[in-house]
Image (spheres, grey):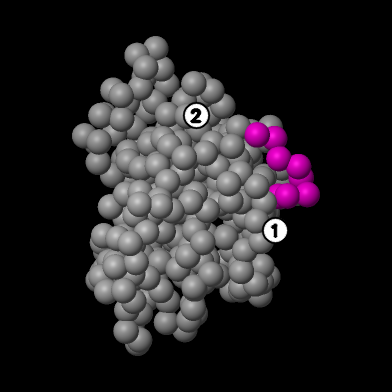
Amino acid sequence: MILAITGPTSGIGSETLKGLVPDCEKALILARNPKKAKALIDSLPKDLQHRAIFIPVDLSDMNSVSKAAALVKKEVTQIDVLINNAGGIFQNKEVTVDGFELSFAANHIGHFLLTNLLMPILLKSKSPKVINVSSEAHRAARPDFNDLQYEKKNYSSFTAYANVKLFNILFTKSLVDRFGHKGLSSYALHPGVVKSNFGMDTSGVFKILWKLATPFMITPKDGAKTSIFLAKTKINKSLNGYYFKKSKPSKPSSEALSKKLRDRLWEVSEKSVANWM
């Protein structure tokens, strides 16, 4: 397996990489922090460390995403599995160098661009897969396609996060619409509510609820299980484009199943990154 994974230097991303690297010929680590990437590689068994290759990328910066895709193409001629794992929730509204709201950029549009730029070498694989880490938070999504960057309405960290987690599922289904006939499989997943500092980056009621739920959360290792399952398992073709929980197909929200919404998202996303495509 030739693997590419975003955000593998901590949390479930780290556990996902560790769980898959024994099956990898090469594992491309797409991450922002070179020190954390080196620490991750050094933590692998010595006989596996040579398989891991660091590719610097900032998913909120489209020039960085474009450069990362070019570096990946220099390292490998094909990718078997791309796991779009990186993501985050941001307490305050921030605008990226490209003019995107940060949550939209880091959780969706960066992965949209990366996946499309890598599609030519994904399709060279005999059974290419794109795996998008979403969340049950998608059920609280309230996207406004006339104001995706929160230029008009007040910014809400949790709603912004819920929206992009919905976009992860819509994107998954759009990939099957457009590339499924070429052999691509794509899946979205909820990793579970993982014990981490994730929810502490928020404020208000959500932060309080996150603290209360902490004793019931799962470990990052358990949170990585569905990603590992999807990467390693041959899934029935009838489940292509599905959303998974606990390594089983699960029904997402009605919005996540809307072809109208996913077509609109694709159109908006394609226009947003046209300068880098």
At x 41%, y 17%, the residue is 48
At x 65%, y 34%, the residue is 233
In-image side of 94 versus 78 (left or right): left
At x 40%, y 52%, the residue is 216
Residue occupied by mark 1: 177
Inspect this view and state whether residue 5 appears. Answer: no
Q: Considering the whole magenta stretch, tell me its main secondary structure.
A: loop
State the mark number for residue 20: 2
Crowd class of label 2 (few under 14; some 14 to 19; many from 20; radius 10 Å): some
Q: For residue 108, which quarter of the picture?
A: bottom left
Does the magenta portion include 238?
Answer: yes
- In the displayed structure, 83 sits above or below 92; it is above
Nearest the viewer among 110 and 38 is: 38
Nearer to us: label 1 or label 2: 2
Taking the view exactly as shown, the residue that stands out farthest to the left is 35
Nearest the viewer among 39 and 108 is: 39
Does the magenta portion include 65?
Answer: no
- In the displayed structure, 13 sits above or below 240; it is above
**Secondary element at image label 1:** helix
Nearest the viewer among 160 and 190 is: 190
Inspect this view and state whether residue 161 appears. Answer: yes
- In the displayed structure, 163 sits above or below 49; it is below
User: In the rendered view of the protein, which quadrant contains the N terminus?
Assistant: top right
In-image side of 21 versus 195 (left or right): right
Q: In the rendered structure, which segment of residues is drawn in magenta? A: 233-240
**Secondary element at image label 2:** helix
